[in-house]
Amino acid sequence: MFTVYRDVRHMSERCLPRTTVLVALVASLVVLSGCQDQPRQTELSSEPSAAVPIAEQPPVPPIAESLLPIPMPVTHADASVTSESVPTATTVTLNDLVLAAKRLHPTAQAIAAARRAAEARMVQAGTWANPELTFSYGRTRPRMSTIPTDNPYGGSLSQRFEWWGKRQARLAAAQAEVAVNEAESAVLLLDLEVDVRLAAIAYATARATTEQTAAQLALAQELAEVVAKRQAAGDIDLGEVSRVRVEASTAHLRHASAQRAVITTGAVLRTWCGESLSEQLIISDVLIDDAPVYTAANLHPRVRTALEMERVSAAQAIAERQNRIPDLTLGIYGEREWEKDTYGVTVSVEIPLWNRNTGGIALADAERQRLFAMRQAEERRLRQAATEALGAWHLAHGQVMLLRDEVLPAAHNAVRLRTTAFQGGDASLADVLDARRALLGAQTDLLDARQRMAEALVLLLATTGTTGSRP
């Protein structure tokens, strides 16, 4: 193997000069032929050469197609907007969504199960102690031979009667626990309503953002057409062309992102209200600018829960004091022996000598005081949160009025004037883009203020237990 490899290597070394000469000859022929065809290659080339005069350079291609948005993958959001099989939009209110969630969400099942458990505890608290039945059987072993062996047997029946006040106190505590369960159920339903309303606000905001971005995309494409015409006439440079392209692509990206946000928020809303919820949903009373009419709120469910728990603790303290009184046990018994039968009645009572339930009473009193303090703290926290939510609503409402009535009309007017001036050649493209960005900022700020208004109403609902009604 080594010998063959060495022979091949020597042979290649001997042939290398001849190969080099052949390659050089072929390269020379190619160069000579390329020099003869040089004018034809210059005409077909897409890049201008330094030897070609500027007047003979090919013109820059028009930018009508380059100004179109960057093509993106077709998604469900795009299909939901452009497809002919779009389902009919369904208009609902916030209350419709809340009722659907309270009917379909598993929270309703949990509340029903907790209510049954509380009622079962109340039934159990009213039951009496079971009677006790005892049987006995034995064998006697006499120590005297004159006494016969015997097998005595007997039985007894006893019933424990607790002090009447104990049962009444226990029933009162169980009834108070039922009231606690009702208050806790109201808290769960309130939390569920808050979550549904926030999800509905997010969905409605996403739909409004989609409508705004669609209008902005249409404006960007219209501006692109104007710039394309001016470029064809030679009245605009490539820098401004690039800026318009970036503007159109950014508008398309915003619109696509808004469409995906509609899909995401709609899916979240269906997790609360059921999968049968329409994909083309319009919520009529979410992003509304008018001021609601506030009504007097009832007792907040959380405060009511704390109050009912305090009542349970008070009832338990009474029950612990009643436990100091001993129970009375009555019974009858009978025994049968070889030479006699014995019958009788028994009465037994516990003597509270070592345990007078002092610790249980002290524990119940301390628990009642703790719950009283926690209720006061919860009331203060809710008042503070309600004050903050009301202030946030007034702040957002003032911003909505200012943006809607003053800033947004001025921004629309500025865009219209700058666009007209640009079409007539009296304004630059930078002026038009600045006006459009100002309009975009005003629209975004207005939608954000409306969203904060709606969320502030939800916070008022969460902190006061009631919501404002529309006039």
Image: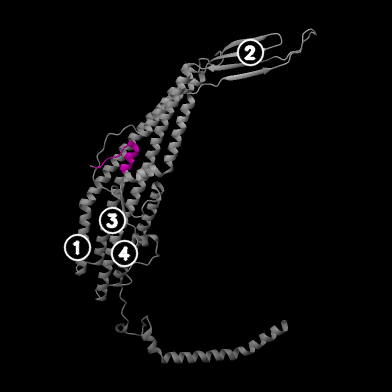
Q: Amino acid at mark 2?
A: Gly
Which residue is at 71% across, 84% downward?
Answer: 4
**Of the residues under marks 3 and 4, which one precedes in the sequence?**
4
The residue singled out by tag 4 in the image is: 247
Q: Amino acid at mark 3?
A: Gly
Instruction: Give the main secondary structure of the magenta stretch.
Output: helix
Q: Amino acid at mark 4?
A: Glu
- The residues colored magenta run 456-470
Q: Amino acid at mark 1?
A: Leu
The residue singled out by tag 3 in the image is: 441
Graded by Cα atoms within 10 Å as few (under 14), some (14 to 19) or many (20 or more), the crowding at tag 1 reads some
Note whether 303 is above or below 334 in the view shown. below
81 sits left or right of 148 in the view: left
**Of the residues under marks 4 and 2, which one precedes in the sequence?**
4
**In the rendered structure, are the residues bearing label 3 and label 2 in contact, judged by CB atoms less than 8 Å apart?**
no
Which residue is at 21% across, 67% downward?
Answer: 422
**Residue 105 quadrant:** top left
On the question of residue 321 being in view, the answer is no
Gap in Å between the C-alphas at discs 1 and 3? 18 Å
The residue singled out by tag 1 in the image is: 417
Note whether 327 is above or below 256 in the view shown. above
Q: Quadrant of the C terminus?
A: top left
